[in-house]
Image (spheres, grey):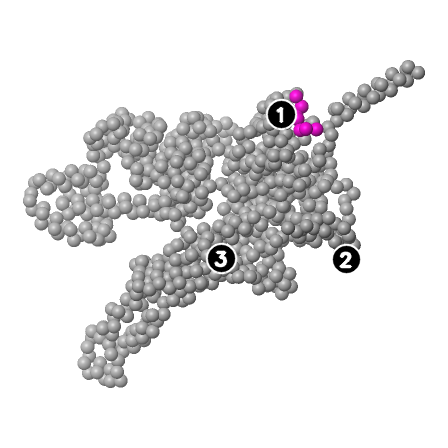
Amino acid sequence: MPTDISNLNLIKNQQSCVKSTIAVKQPDFNKYFLSDFVEIQRKSFYTLLEKGIIEEFSKRNPITNVKKTMELFFYPNYYQLTPPDYTPSQAIIKSKSYTSKLYIPVQLTDKNSKTIKLKWVYIGDLPLMTKRGHFILNGCARVIVNQMIRSPGIYYQKKIYENYSDKWSEKPENIFTRYYADLICNRGTWLRIEMDRYNKIWAQMKRVPKIPIMWFLIALGLTDKIVLKSIMDSKMLLYNLQEDPLNPQKKSLPYVKTPPAAWTAIYNIVFSKKIKKTKNKKIINKSLKKKEKKSQKLLLQKNATKKLTKDKTAQLAIARSNTSLFKKLNQKSYKNLSFSELITLKKAIELKSEQGRKWIFNKFMNPRTYDLGKVGRLNFNTKLKLSISSNITTLTPQDFLAATNYLILVSKGLRELDDIDHLKNRRVRTSGELIQMQIGIGLVRLEKTVREKMSNAINSITYTSNDKKNLPQITKKSNLVSRKTNQKKQLSNRNERQRVIKFEANKRNLYKIDISNIMNTKPFNGALREFFGTSPLSQFMDQINPLAELTHKRRLSSMGPGGVTRDSATLAIRGIHPSHYGRICPVETPEGKNTGLVNSLTAYARVNTEGYIETPFYKVYKGQVQKKTGLYFFSAKQEEKIKLGAPDLYTTKIGFLPKASIPVRIIEDFTKIARNEMQFVGVAPIQMISIATSLIPFFEHDDANRALMGSNMQRQAVPILKPQRPIVGTGLEARAVSDSGHVITARYSGIVTYTSSNKIIIYTQIS
């Protein structure tokens, strides 16, 4: 008997120990925190309607003609969209488009006649997104795929040069590592500041010869003193010079060692007040002063040359045609030049420098041709530690100066290189942003046509006012009179008639310059039609089953305009990066040429307003997981600053982590720390995989290749007539079907009291 009692006590003790070690299952709040799976499409189109259209029209305000006598001004804040002509189902049946007409109030100001006209103008048809997240054009459902591109900003990388003594030698004789910076923008010219194998620094663009960085910085408006004082190792900028500044007779400085004469020039430029004049302009000025002192006759010559200085193009023509002038210029013999030759030469040099500065301004500093965007400006400011306003979305001389200085610091090993494949350096262009870009292209075309029509109207007005007196009066006897008089100065009879006809037509249309005549819907509609019809990012919706439709709307493509191509994409671009955790699924990707270039968003991921992918975490306070405080979303850049724990960590009933050291991830390193040091933990184990992959049961015990094929083949499954529950489910099936829009969903939540094949009754409390 006592033995039995002792056995019973032992069993009870064992049971209590087991209960204390097994975690009591917490209520699964995770599935309720899942955001809507089609939110990425709907939210992006909503931001287009709320902000995007207004931004694009504001960029084009106002449109003026060349003489600025007429001005067209949009009021985009008051734009209106008409209700669509068809519902989505009617558009599919009738093979029509689900679109809405866009109207904007436009003001036309004529400064000559001092009139202002205000009118609602029909701009074009804007395709509308359905509540399921796709567009209907000509009866076909289309999806705009989200594009993954490099974020605008500045990125530093290295290039390795290898020199081989022989063609067949295996090992290189010399290896050089040089660095370069890419300045990436939303719209504009591509620019690279690179250091070649001889430590020369160049500014390089497409279809333009590379420019020495010193020339480039001076052309931006910076002085020698500012450039050489603000850059760390300023002697590197002088490696590009082909001449000694103090002694122009000597040619070609050595690449690595700067001669002492160049250092004295630098010292004089930076530290002394009296700067030695060695440039062409300053030598010309010296010789001019000498000439003025020698004779008083120069006053007469000055008056003669004033007429020449008015037209700069004429001076250039004189300078080019005068071959002897350029011969003297090449020989550096300014003493032999006459006064008029010196004047023309000076003006020619000034004109060339002005043209160069205008060219650089239009390339990088004109907001109509170059745009970094607010994200790009923020990236430049944080990288180069600048404090330029976020409203300035073009490059400035300070940007170029700081970028050159940073490149020299990188070459010295004082700054780190950038990882382009990191998600902090890549952003997502959602469907709304892609449509906004296309609207911008349409408005550029519209601006061009409006300006042409304005200039034509003004030309007709000036023609009628000036040529009215000079027009010949045509009568029936005009032919006989012309034969008798034989005046050679008069035009032929045919030309006279044409001039009169033109005059009468212009006279009729003189006061008919109206907004409706100037505006046109073709540019706007044509740009959108091109994008939806021919762009590789606009695709027919995959409608095989609800899962296929859902994954198509959550797809991320690295290809398309501004992205990579299949042939140029390297393994580094296609591979999996540690920053993909919780943002891009490492499993679901196509097999073949598109592997790694077409990805899918994870179940919990979302895209913020700047275009960066975010993933949620729970906060940990003194070892306790704070689930009730909600989710904290972090981008890849923000995640680098925190200590993260895995989502499947053991927690007690009240959410405390174990006292033992816990494995965590800090940036890319895995270590173990105490629970009090931990800051955040993951939300759910399916956080790192996509919807299609999370439908595979016991995914963690499956091979990655098998899971890849399984997630892709699920999208090809033909749906059955009668839907059935899965034999082994993961809990995400109902949510996937409801968000895809293929099932009937109630408008309000409530208590289900009756269900049948015909109706479902729900009792709700509507406030």
How far apart in space, not on screen, are marks 2 and 1 (Cα)?
A: 52 Å
Farthest-out residue, top: 2
Farthest-out residue, front: 767
> What kind of element bears circle 2?
loop
**Front-most of residues 244 and 219:** 219
* Part of the protein shown in magenta: 653-659
Q: Please give the residue where the numbered disc 1 appears in the rendered image.
A: 623
Q: Describe residue 755's horizontal placement relative to residue 78 as left or right.
A: right
Residue positioned 39% across, 40% down in the render:
389
**Front-most of residues 478 and 151:** 151
Q: Please give the residue where the numbered disc 3 appears in the rendered image.
A: 527
Residue 69 shows in the view: yes
Q: Position of residue 93 (x, y in %)?
A: 64, 63
Decide whether residue 657 is among the magenta residues: yes
Q: Describe residue 91's horizontal placement relative to residue 189 as left or right.
A: right
| Foreground disc of the pair 1, 3 | 1
Q: Please give the residue where the numbered disc 2 appears in the rendered image.
A: 758
* Other residues around mark 2 within 10 Å, as few (<14) / some (14–19) / many (≥20): few
How far apart in space, not on screen, are marks 1 and 3 (Cα)?
A: 56 Å
**Of the residues under marks 3 and 2, which one precedes in the sequence?**
3
Residue positioned 34% across, 45% down in the render:
361
Residue type at mark 3? Ala
* Other residues around mark 1 within 10 Å, as few (<14) / some (14–19) / many (≥20): many
Residue type at mark 1? Gly
* Other residues around mark 3 within 10 Å, as few (<14) / some (14–19) / many (≥20): many
